[in-house]
Amino acid sequence: MATRLRARRARALFLWRSLLPGGVERTAITLVDHLQAAGWSFFLGLLEPHGDFHAWTQHPRRLLYPRWGPRTARQEENLAFALRAIPRLGWYAVRAQALVNRVRPDLFFTHSGVDVLVAGALARRRGAVWIARVGSDAFADISEKHPWGRPVFKRFLSLAYRRPDHIVAASEGLRRRLTEDLRVPASRVSVIPNPVDVARIQEEARRPPAEYATGDFVVGVGRLTSNKGFDLLIRAAARLFRSERPIRLIILGDGEEREPLRELAHELGIAHLVSLPGYEPSPWRVMSRALALVAPSRQEGFSNVIVEAMACGAPILATDCHGPREIVNA
C-alpha cells in the first residue's frame, strides 16, 4: 500500500453522507481539523446538501459538498434503509464519482453507512487505495429487525465489506464481527477508535449550563432511535422511583422515538421527571454537571458519547455491547 501512495501526489478524500447534528458528525469535523501529514492534502466530501458547515471547521477549504439535490432526514443506518433508497444510491454514486474526479485522491476513505459503502464501490477510483470505516454493527441491527433475511443480509454484507482494500473498525467487537461472521480477511482489518477533541470538549464543559441542567440529574445523549435504548433508561428510572427515590432524567437528542419516549414516561407515571429538550449543540456543559452519563444502547459500535463524558469527568453507566464494553473496562 505504501508504494502505491508514494507513487503520486498524496491527496486523501473522506466520503461522508452528510453532516447532520450528532456524534458521528463531530468525528468528521475532528478529522478535518486535526489530520496533518507532510505532503498530504485532506478533503471531506459530503453526498447530501444539509446547509453550510464551513463555519464548523478550522479548515473550510477542505470541506466539499453539493449545493442542491435530494436529501434525507436522519434515519437509522441499516440495510433496509439503504435498500429502500435505490434512487438515492444512484445520486450518491454520481456525486462520489464527481468528488473523485475533482480531488483525484490517492486515498479514498468511505464512512457513514452501507449506502456510502455501495457508492464507493460504484465510483471509479482511478487507482486510489480504498479504506472503509465501520463504526456500527449493521449485521446485528438488520438481523434483529429482519431475522427472516439473516442469511441474505450476511451474504450481502460479506461481499460489500470485502470490496475495500482495507477496513478500519471502531472497536475490537466490530473487528470480530467482520472477520469471524462476515469472513473479511483479518489482514485487511485494523482497529482505530474514533478521534475525540478532548481540549475542545473540556473547554465547552466549562461554559455556563443550559437552563434545564440544574439540580441532581442523570443524562443520556444520542439520536432518539430504538437502537439507542432510551426506553430502557426510562423504564429503569421508573423502577428506581417506585423502589427507592425519584431521579430526574435529561435525554438530549432528536429523532423518530421522541414522541414514543414521551408517551412511555406518561404511561409509567414519571413524565414530570423526564426532560427531552432536543438536540444540544454543546452537550458537554450538561454532561459535566450530571450525576452520571447513561448509555443504554442495544448496539453500539464505539460510543463517542462515553469518551466525551469521561473527558468531562462524568461517571458512566452503559449497557454491555461492542464499544461500551471495551471503553468502560479500559
Image: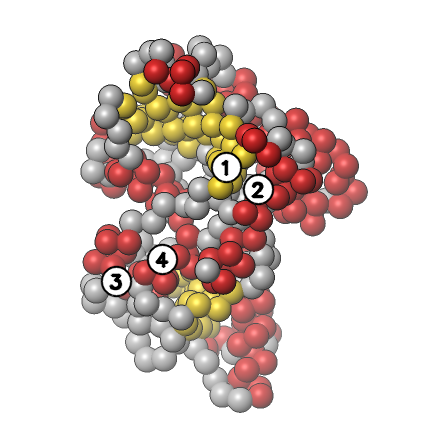
Q: Earlier in the sequence, mark 2 or mark 4?
A: 2
Please state which amino acid type lies under the numbered disc 2. Answer: Arg
Q: Where 112 sits versus 272, above or below?
A: above
Instruction: Give SS at disc 1.
Output: strand
Are there few (<14), some (14-19), or many (20+) residues within 10 Å of tag 4?
many
Q: Where 154 sits versus 231, above or below?
A: above
Q: Is residue 31 left or right of residue 138?
A: left
Res 205 label? 3
Instruction: Give SS at disc 4.
Output: helix
The Cα–Cα distance between marks 1 and 2, rounded to whole angstroms, is 7 Å
Q: Residue 273 lies in what quarter of the image?
A: bottom left
Q: Residue 159 lies in what quarter of the image?
A: top right
Please state which amino acid type lies under the numbered disc 1. Answer: Ser
The Cα–Cα distance between marks 3 and 4, rounded to whole angstroms, is 10 Å
Q: Earlier in the sequence, mark 3 or mark 1?
A: 1
Q: Position of residue 13 (x, y in %)?
A: 37, 24
Q: Which residue is mark 4?
A: 308
Q: Is residue 263 left or right of residue 273?
A: right
Residue contact between numbered discs 1 and 2, judged by CB atoms under 8 Å? yes
Q: Which residue is mark 2?
A: 175
Q: Nearer the viewer, mark 3 or mark 4?
A: 4
Name the foreground residue: 269 vs 170: 170
